[in-house]
Image (cartoon, grey):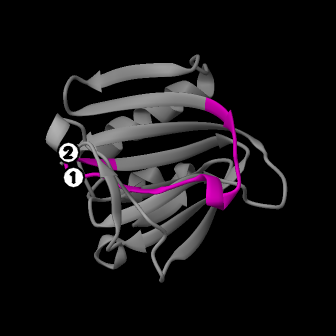
Amino acid sequence: MVSGKIADLKRYYSLHPAMEFIDKFMQEYMAEPKPDGGYEIIPGRLKATVSSYETGKAEEKRFEAHKKFADVQVIVKGAERIDWADLSVCTDMLSEEYSKGGDIAFYAEPKFLSKVTLKTAMFMVMFPEDAHKPCVMAGNTPEAVTKIVFKVLL
């Protein structure tokens, strides 16, 4: 797991070649925001989904993990908490879509986790070993958030 400010994305170009494309997409988005929806950046290898929603209570959300894609989640507006745990401590799988061609599995709350609050203009990268529970309220009340989730083929 890696987190930082979108203004510093250039520092992460060596992390994965897609980071440069994500930085370019974010620069274009900040100059001219796009409506909610999906955007193919590199067909089959990198896509972005712009979403606007309200955060919710932690107990209403689930831990998830992916095998084929890394997530790069960027907060454009608002704040949300993302709970994180190493996948090795997620021992109770609730459901999975891997066998159906999907790239997601859901897990029960692990015993050991970290809580990361992302605010406007911050991002978090999650690799296959990073179980995560996004869209959690950063404070005591739901908050309107606009977020872009990049799916990066590994």
Marks 1/2 in contact by CB < 8 Å: the verdict is yes
> For this rendering, which residue is in front, 76 or 105?
105
Q: Quadrant of residue 29?
A: top right
The magenta region covers 52-70
Residue 55 lies within the magenta run: yes
> For this rendering, which residue is in front, 106 or 154?
106
> For this rendering, which residue is in front, 123 or 116?
116
Q: Position of residue 53 (x, y in %)?
A: 67, 34
Type of amino acid under label 1: Lys
- Quadrant in which the N terminus appears: bottom left
Q: Position of residue 86 (x, y in %)?
A: 36, 74
Residue 80: mark in rendering = none
40 left or right, relative to 84: left
Residue 67: mark in rendering = 1
Type of amino acid under label 2: Tyr
> How many marks overall?
2
Give above or below for 36 relative to 71.
above
